[in-house]
Image (tube, rainbow, N blue to C red):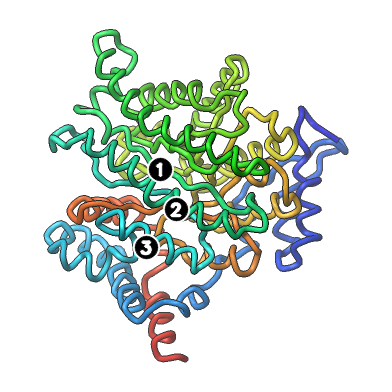
Amino acid sequence: MLKNGRLPIAKIVSKSVKLDSGISGAFVRGYVSHTQSKQSTIAIPPAQVGEKLAPPSAGAFLKPLSTKELLSLGAIGCATINDKVLNSVIKVFPYVPSSVVKMFVSSLYCGGDNIMEAREKGKMLRGRGINNMMLSLTIEDCEGIKNIDINYIVEETIRSLHEVLKPNMEEQLSVAEDVNVIPPGYLALKPSALVSNPSDVLKNFMAPEWREKSDELVENCSRITEEVFRLNQEFAKRYPDRKAPFFVSTIDAEKYISQEPGVRELQRILFAKYNPRSSRMVSCIGTWQLYLRDSAAELELQRERAQREGYRLGLKLVRGAYLHSEPNRDIIFPSKEATDENFNDVMVKVIQDLLVRGEDSVYGHMVVASHNYHSQMLATMLLVSSDGSYGKANVVLAQLLGMSDNVTHDLIYNHGAKNIIKYVPWGPPEETKDYLLRRLQENGDAMKSESGWPLVKQVAKTLLHL
């Protein structure tokens, strides 16, 4: 039975429980509650779900790591033992030589300095069951003070598509029994790296006097996405049974003052151009930050517009990349629980639509970018009984390289998830060092919760084979 064109959550999840005996049925029942109507259900806040399912320990994912990786993780654990130590590390980090950072930290969280190292990182991830990446060339200039070579960034990004993501995909397709279990390869595009004076351009994106600079940003993003689109069409002819895109251009999030209207309108322009309903697959997705109070309503407005104008949306869902640095706290949900509820509600709604409508869904593709175990497990359970469907092929789970590896390992080896990627930053050491500092600042709480003293103890046990 359909409710407003969507399958009730209980219908999907009940099938998932039968097929995945390793998942607690209590977790599912905690998320779904029947109303008096037999055709509709309501979601219980995810905070209640969180009480029923603890994240996996770090022990299992540490076993395959090298001694160097284990020692580096031990150092990360020591740096995140408590707030005082973490804050001290953040203050000192800018003064640590890049060579030291690369030796002890970068290999865990970054894909390397160049194309060759990024490609090797992809092979390493495949050996651990992670079959694709979202590559991000970490050169950006949010404040417009670096005088970066934008044309170089565009050309290197396109080069990484051809020399990293394309061979990575071809090698897997050539031996795959099912071409739909391999997730796409993604390119992350930072608007703040693709136009000079980006903050002002994005804030004034719709203003006539800024039209030339806005068009320049659209053109630079289009040069990359056009190549993605062309490769998708080429590969689709070779692999006609493929339901998901082979490659995807991803517009990364910016701070709210730049996100609205600049990044949002940039995404819409690219969707309309590269995600036409006439194409079997999308070639571009954008980022929705679901810690924002208006995010669900804004997404619905975008869905309605896409429906009217004949193109598909592509989504990367995140809780929020700028929680600590956002000055206007009124635009953010007041609690983690409220953010979790919004994230899960939007995620479930999109998954339902993709599973029920298939190729008729306005949501062409979604990446669930989260370190939250409960969200990732919920998505996995909703999809587990839908093998071979358009919907399942177009929902991909993602985490940052080096973060939530216990979650990634658990989903792959205990729940059979194949639709998993890692966000892999790469580029010059000074730039990746800036990226690592931002991760400490913005993801420090998450790093502390999954690292700290427990990680130090697990690393020691692994090294000592205890």
Identify the residue under disc 2.
Answer: 167
- Gap between marks 1 and 2 measured at Cα: 14 Å
**Amino acid at circle 1:** Leu
Identify the residue under disc 3.
Answer: 120
- For numbered disc 1, what is the local secondary structure? strand
- For numbered disc 2, what is the local secondary structure? helix
Mark number for residue 187?
Answer: 1
Residue at the image position 39 percent from the left and 52 percent from the top? 164
Residue 93, above or below 462: above
Mark 2 vs 3, N-terminal side: 3
Nearer-the-camera pick, 186 or 96? 186
- Gap between marks 2 and 3 measured at Cα: 11 Å
- Gap between marks 3 and 1 measured at Cα: 17 Å
Does residue 112 appear left or right of residue 28 in this picture? left
Residue at the image position 46 percent from the left and 55 percent from the top? 168
Residue at the image position 31 percent from the left and 58 percent from the top? 116
| Mark 2 or 3: the one toward you | 2
Residue 462 pos. (x, y %): 43, 85
Residue at the image position 34 percent from the left and 14 percent from the top? 206
**Amino acid at circle 2:** Pro
Nearer-the-camera pick, 32 or 57? 57
Circles 1 and 2 in contact, beta carbons < 8 Å: no
**How crowded is the residue under tag 2: few (<14 C-alpha within 10 Å), some, or many (20+)?**
few
